[in-house]
Amino acid sequence: MSALTTTPFAVQTPDNTVKVIVMNKSDDLPTAFALHAANAKRKVALRISGGCGNMTDADKEDMVAYFLEAFRGYEGVLFSGATRQAKDGKIDPMVTDIPGLIAQANPGCIALGTVPRTGLMQLVEESRLVLDPDGTAPSPNQSAILIVQDGPDKPSEWDGDLNVYFQLMENWRDAANFTSLGLTSWNGGGVTLKEIMTSASKGWPTFLIGGSGRKTDEVIAKLEASDEELLAQLPEGHKIIIAEKDDPQTLRDALIKHGFLGF
């Protein structure tokens, strides 16, 4: 897992820089950020959603290996939250690391991230930017990060960037002829549930990794039980697809079927 042993805050993008843009969520979409998607070889985009609650270090390394195998050869845009965690001077891998790791392994893939401003951003140590007083770091392996704030004085909740990133993806479809948009969910909490339901409600392919835990598994269980409350929130013929945590080929096959891989 050499990708996980790098210095956790060292920039790992192709040009050794990460562009950081701040916007108010009431503003127009920033062209300077949206245009980064044009650098992807293929005009497809997936949001990688979720979290790593109740996972051990070994579970997290298995998660990284799972996604690297499932997305082998991917050349589109991958999009996630834009934070990184570190532990004992090493990367503590999270779902938010997945797009950048896949981009490093697959030339032609572009990793991008959005994050709500939930606190006061600060410079610490030798002028390293953190996103809040808890020291949450911006991801150094995504080509560009969009920080979404609810005005200059009011902190946002952790779902404060959802509407913006869904609008960005739709903009890529409508203005840049992206052919496929979707979302993949692993584990996750309340914000992940909102992401799953928003993606599925749009009729997008929404890939849920069964066995990954928490809200992702809860939605799968309700689907398998034909839960009427859940089904009432989904369009007829929704595209929720279930893959298996222990078999990355199940996700890979679904990505091929829905136009994200195997061009």
Image: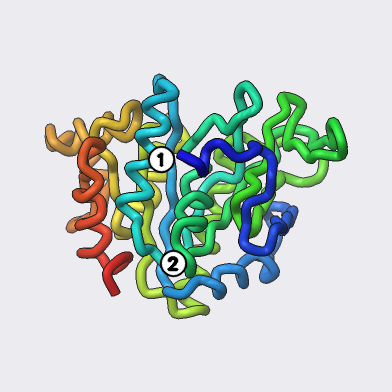
Residue ID at (25%, 55%): 252
| Picture coordinates of residue 67, whole percent (x, y) | 36, 46
User: Looking at the picture, does residue 160 appear above or below residue 212?
Assistant: below
Say if residue 253 shows up in the picture: yes
The residue under label 1 is 64
Element on which disc 2 rests: loop
Q: Residue furthest front?
A: 2
Q: Residue furthest left?
A: 225
Q: Amino acid at mark 1?
A: Val
Residue ID at (74%, 53%): 22
User: Looking at the picture, does residue 207 appear above or below residue 84?
Assistant: below
Residue ID at (27%, 59%): 255
Viewed as shown, does residue 219 lie left or right of 65? left
**Dot 1, crowdedness within 10 Å: few (<14), some or many (≥20)?**
many
Alpha carbons under labels 2 and 1: distance apart: 18 Å
User: Looking at the picture, does residue 57 appear above or below residue 207?
Assistant: above
| Picture coordinates of residue 239, whole percent (x, y) | 23, 55
Q: Disc number at residue 76?
A: 2
Front position in the image: 222 or 39: 39
Q: How is the image coloured?
A: rainbow
| Picture coordinates of residue 121, whole percent (x, y) | 79, 37
